[in-house]
Image (cartoon, rainbow, N blue to C red):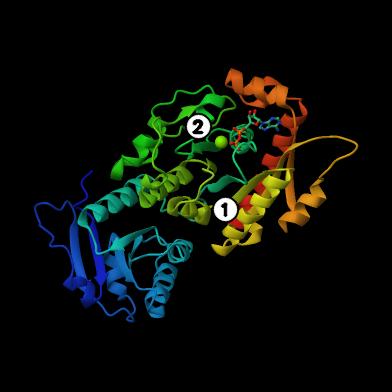
Amino acid sequence: MDLSEYKIEIVLSEAEIAVLERVDGAASKLTVAINPLDLSAPIPVELAQTASVLCVEVNPQSRQSIARIAALRAEQPDLPIIALVREADLSLVRALLRQGVNDVIELPLSIAQLTESVGDLIANRKGQTPRNHQKAGKLIAVVKSIGGVGATNVAVNLAATLAAQGDDRACLFDLDVQFGNAATYLGAAAEPSLTELLEGGARIDGDFLRTVMSVVSGGASFVPAPAEILPIEAVDEAQLRRVLQTARNEFEFVVADLPANWANWTLSVVAQSDLIILVVELSVGSLRQGKRQLQLLKSQGIESSRIAVLVNRVEQRLFKTIGLDDAAKVLGHPVQFHVHNDYPLMSAANNQGIVVADLNKRSKIARDFARTAQAVSEMAVQAAS
Ligand SMILES: Nc1ncnc2c1ncn2[C@@H]1O[C@H](COP(=O)(O)OP(=O)(O)O)[C@@H](O)[C@H]1O
Ligand SMILES: [Mg+2]
């Protein structure tokens, strides 16, 4: 792709210009213009009107530098905007993305990173109407109280039930980079995987994404976890954000199975999510850890309305030790969904590499997932609006 035909306008304070990497004209594929501007000054209208992509410095210390982004977006709904931030913390990144910024890049500015981001923005725009935030697919993150509660099965079956509603409705990412086993449950090849996408740099677009995806049992398009165990911190947060954004341009629902451990990038994924499903079991250990997970999510500024609790493996017994009401009380959060316990069916489905609906559509758990998917799609749409 020839990026030189696009005009990249960069707005930086004098302090950041002083430490800017020297742009070697021959080495850079971009046509870049640097515009010195005070952090508190509004963005000149001409600049916003003539830029193909506008990169604007944001400093959390300067309220005006954040406010001018909102003003810019309001005036230029279709302009690709990249925020440039020094030591961006997660809540700021989240706030910026919510204001409609298309990407966030860390300062000091690296031309390589800028080239990657611009390439991605322009590729995503080709042949389609400008990216409309209302139209973006919904991101649904599946997290768990502790390993073994059935989160992967929830993610897999939920994605399948959402996918059953039409072509390109749903895709599934196995982001459990160390213990991901969704591919096994789905009878899918282990490669290509998330690794190709994380290493794909600026090549990430809808077509590239689909070369990595395979359509699995139930009809969802699936990206397996890396075949080799990655150190949890090795995932590049910005690259993954681009990958997920691309997926949201292609699918109505993007389901992500997250690891049990938190890292910066997993917090970023939940921050970007329209809905977070916390999977727990009715055991003391799982509920206790579930409560801690909820506290963590809330401490990240995630509203309760974006979190749904799913209790898995519910027994239908006359005398229950812990019921759904007790779970809600312990968690301090309502229990929105539950899935029954059916180990024979679930393990048969897992062993055959198919989703439960493909094994027995009329089973209780298949119906549980169908009901959950219906409510999840409604919740995700509501949370996003
Ligand atoms: N609703 C269920 N009923 C019975 N067994 C289940 C159910 N959900 C999951 N399991 C079983 O629990 C085990 C762990 O499931 P998995 O989805 O891999 O958990 P996690 O991803 O939370 O570690 C698997 O053996 C699976 O078959
Ligand atoms: Mg799992």
Q: Which residue is mark 2?
A: 221
For disc 1, the neighbor class at 10 Å (few under 14, some 14 to 19, many from 20) is many
Viewer-proximal residue among 377 and 61: 61
For disc 2, the neighbor class at 10 Å (few under 14, some 14 to 19, many from 20) is many
Distance from the alpha carbon under mark 1 to that under mark 2: 19 Å
Q: Which residue is mark 1?
A: 274
The amino acid on which the numbered mark 2 sits, given as a three-letter code, is Ser
Judged from this view, the residue extending furthest toward the front is 285
Residue at the image point whose x is 38% and y is 30% from the top: 211
Q: Is residue 79 visible?
A: yes
Q: Is label 1's Cβ within 8 Å of ligand 1?
A: no
Judged from this view, the residue extending furthest toward the top is 352
Q: Is residue 60 above or below residue 208?
A: below
Q: Earlier in the sequence, mark 1 or mark 2?
A: 2
Residue at the image point whose x is 56% and y is 46% from the top: 141
Q: Quadrant of the C terminus?
A: bottom right
Dot 2: what SS?
Answer: strand
Q: Toward which corner of the image does residue 298 lie, by quadrant?
A: bottom right
Dot 1: what SS?
Answer: loop
The amino acid on which the numbered mark 1 sits, given as a three-letter code, is Asp
Q: Quadrant of the N terminus?
A: top left
Q: Is residue 210 above or below residue 45?
A: above
Q: Is label 2's Cβ within 8 Å of ligand 2?
A: no
Across and down, in percent, residue 266 comes to 48, 50
Viewer-proximal residue among 303 and 7: 303
Across and down, in percent, residue 258 comes to 52, 43
Residue at the image point whose x is 71% and y is 26% from the top: 343
Question: Where does ligand 1 appear, by image quarter?
Answer: top right
Left or right of residue 111: residue 61: right
Across and down, in percent, residue 373 comes to 67, 40
Viewer-proximal residue among 52 and 315: 315
Left or right of residue 6: residue 192: right
